């Protein structure tokens, strides 16, 4: 009798504890835990090798990652924003140019363009996908004089933009396409091609929370154009054509280090499995969350890498507060359109982008990372469905 009741007491405690434990939006401790030994071993090897920057690990990772993306070249750089900047510079983007891009993707493209001395030229997004609207892009390319020097296409939340349509539009006007794949590592189109293999050049971030993350900063530019690849290789190292021979203007120091390249080689074989689990979670959410004031994204196939699972609600503030009260964390990606950011507004007139602005006010990212367990997934679904005081 004694024993039975103490078991019940303990079970109740565990239940209460489970309720109290917050479902986080991300948990990198869980993410790396199965690989602690392997990561430690490769770190030891790098340390013992005495080679720390742009060495054999970087070469090996570049080759593996190019192969994974289905392109001929990958160039490791310091982070995703540098990848965008160096890709733009390699395309010749410079002072006085404009770069077409969306305004709902966190300002990364604008930061890169402005680092080249160019200005963003903003295009609205499609309501269904939250990615660049091909019709709006076409309107801009038709009217803009001079025409943008490049187009950045962001595969937001890990969902491939409408590449076949966009590439056609870009081709008609002869404007090169830069894919921003920082949220879309491994996303695969219906034609079997991966994110990064569609544009003239593509950019990746390996920031730790990305689908393929390092244990620090990292990034890559990928392309099948040997001329662009050669330029990015020069630009990431002072514009050198060889040691101490500064040939190409606009050079920087932006290199991937050996430690991160070694870690990324441990992680890369896991990417498809991680993405599959992300999609499984997203699917469970899209089927399980049924609420009049929460709009869930359509269930997607491999064209969605599950980087972020983003719902929309007219009462986003209320939903976020309700979830927090149920110990479910959430975040907003992204709360402010580029066109409403202080540094952009200060620069002068910014266009009104109705779809973008509506999304910025309504999007909410729920926990979605590969190590989230089924109990947590159910908890998130139940918490959403239990939301009552919406308005
Ligand atoms: C994270 C991210 C970047 C920037 O990558 P960093 O490595 O943090 O510089 C660029 N674009 C998008 C869409 C991102 O999500």
Image (spheres, rainbow, N blue to C red):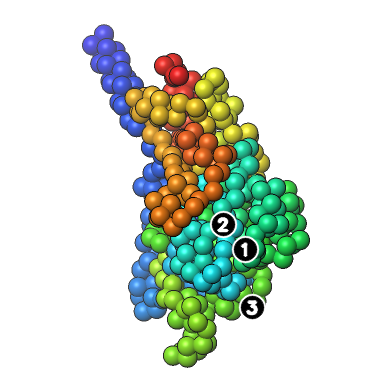
Q: Residues within 10 Å of mark 2 (few under 14, many from 20)?
A: many
What separation in Å lies between label 3 and label 1 (alpha carbons)? 21 Å
What separation in Å lies between label 1 and label 2 (alpha carbons)? 7 Å
**Which residue sits at x=38%, y=44%?**
27
Task: Decide: is 316 above or below 26.
Answer: above
Task: Decide: is 27 above or below 382.
Answer: below
The nearer-to-camera label among 3 and 1 is 1
**Which residue sits at x=65%, y=59%?**
144
The nearer-to-camera label among 3 and 2 is 2
Mark 1 or mark 2: name the one nearer the start of the chain: 2
Q: Are marks 1 and 2 in contact (CB under 8 Å)?
A: yes
In front: 76, or 236? 236
Q: Circle 1 sits on which residue? A: 148
Tag 2, which secondary structure? strand
Label 1, ligand 1: CB separation under 8 Å: no
What separation in Å lies between label 3 and label 2 (alpha carbons)? 26 Å
Residue 328 position within the rendered picture, expressed as x and y whole percent measured from the top left? 39, 30
Mark 3 or mark 1: name the one nearer the start of the chain: 1
Residue 259 position within the rendered picture, expressed as x and y whole percent measured from the top left? 40, 68
In front: 248, or 347? 347
Residue 314 position within the rendered picture, expressed as x and y whole percent measured from the top left? 49, 27
Residue 348 position within the rendered picture, expressed as x and y whole percent measured from the top left? 46, 55
- Do we see residue 192 in this rendering? no
Label 2, ligand 1: CB separation under 8 Å: no
Query: 145 left or right of 119?
Result: right
Q: Circle 2 sits on which residue? A: 121
- Do we see residue 139 in this rendering? yes
Q: Circle 3 sits on which residue? A: 227
Q: Are marks 3 and 1 in contact (CB under 8 Å)?
A: no
Tag 3, which secondary structure? helix
Residue 176 is labelled as: none
């Amino acid at each position: 009798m004694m024993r039975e009741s103490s078991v019940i007491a303990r079970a109740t405690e565990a239940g209460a504890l489970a309720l109290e434990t917050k479902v986080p939006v991300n948990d990198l401790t869980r993410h790396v835990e199965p690989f602690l030994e392997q990561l430690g071993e490769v770190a030891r090897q790098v340390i013992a090798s005495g080679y720390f920057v742009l060495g054999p690990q970087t070469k090996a990772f570049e080759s593996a990652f190019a192969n994974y993306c289905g392109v001929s070249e990958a160039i490791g750089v310091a982070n995703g924003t540098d990848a965008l900047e160096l890709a733009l510079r390699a395309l010749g983007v410079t002072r006085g140019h404009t770069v077409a891009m969306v305004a709902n993707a966190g300002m990364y493209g604008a930061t890169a363009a402005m680092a080249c001395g160019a200005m963003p030229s903003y295009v609205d997004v499609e309501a269904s996908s939250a990615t660049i609207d091909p019709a709006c892009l076409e309107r801009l390319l038709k009217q803009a004089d001079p025409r943008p020097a490049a187009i950045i296409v962001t595969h937001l939340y890990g969902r491939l933009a409408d590449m076949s349509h966009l590439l056609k539009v870009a081709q008609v006007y002869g404007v090169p396409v830069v894919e921003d794949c920082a949220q879309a590592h491994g996303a695969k189109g219906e034609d079997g091609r991966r994110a990064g293999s569609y544009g003239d050049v593509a950019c990746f971030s390996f920031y730790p929370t990305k689908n393929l993350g390092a244990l620090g900063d990292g990034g890559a530019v990928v392309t099948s154009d040997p001329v662009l690849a050669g330029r990015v290789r020069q630009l990431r190292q002072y514009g050198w054509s060889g040691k101490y021979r500064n040939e190409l203007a606009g050079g920087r120091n932006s290199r991937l280090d050996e430690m991160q390249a070694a870690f990324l080689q441990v992680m890369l074989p896991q990417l498809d499995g991680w993405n599959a689990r992300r999609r499984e979670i997203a699917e469970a959410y899209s089927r399980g969350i049924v609420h009049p004031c929460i709009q869930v994204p359509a269930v997607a196939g491999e064209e969605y890498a599950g980087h972020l699972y983003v719902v929309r609600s007219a009462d986003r503030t209320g939903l976020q507060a309700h979830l927090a009260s149920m110990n479910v964390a959430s975040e907003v990606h992204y709360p402010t359109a580029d066109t409403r950011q202080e540094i952009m507004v200060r620069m002068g007139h910014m266009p009104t982008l109705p779809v973008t602005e509506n999304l910025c006010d309504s999007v909410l990212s729920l926990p979605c990372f590969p190590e989230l367990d089924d109990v947590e997934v159910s908890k998130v679904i139940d918490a959403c469905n239990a939301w009552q005081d919406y308005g």
